[in-house]
Image: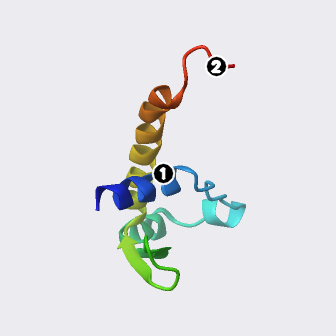
Amino acid sequence: MTISIILFALTMAGAPPTLQTNAAASEPATQAVKDESKPICRRYAQVGSNIARRKVCMSKTEWDQLARSSQALGRSMLPALTVPGAQ
């Protein structure tokens, strides 16, 4: 279970950021507030299966928080992965 959480976190850290268009920037503020609470669902392959998928639904705020924490986790693990004296 812990390994799947770490893999999920590292997968999210490598996900490309979404690009906003000018049309998205011109939406009213009330629409932006609605979008923050609207659930966004993504499907991920389950570890150990080529067929099974897992559906994860969270709000945009939660997805952003997960991405930030995943990036922080990846950065914190990076020094442990480097070999001293290697070039």
Q: Nearer the viewer, residue 68 or 5?
A: 5
- Helix, strand or loop status at disc 2: loop
Please count the marks in the image. Answer: 2
87, above or below 58, in the image: above
Few, some or many C-alpha atoms within 10 Å of disc 2 (few <14, some 14-19, many ≥20)? Answer: few
Q: Position of residue 13 (x, y in %)?
A: 51, 50
Mark 2 and mark 1: span between their CA atoms?
24 Å
Residue type marked 1? Leu
Q: Would you name the residue on which mark 1 appears?
A: 10
Q: Which mark is residue 86?
A: 2
Q: Quadrant of residue 59?
A: bottom left
Q: Residue furthest top?
A: 85
Q: Residue furthest bottom?
A: 51
Q: Nearer the viewer, residue 18 or 73?
A: 73
Q: Residue at x 38, y 74 (%)?
A: 56
Residue 59 appears in the rendering: yes
Q: Position of residue 42 (x, y in %)?
A: 48, 74
Disc number lying in front (2 or 1): 2
Residue type marked 2? Ala
Q: Residue furthest left?
A: 1
Q: Residue at x 43, y 74 (%)?
A: 46
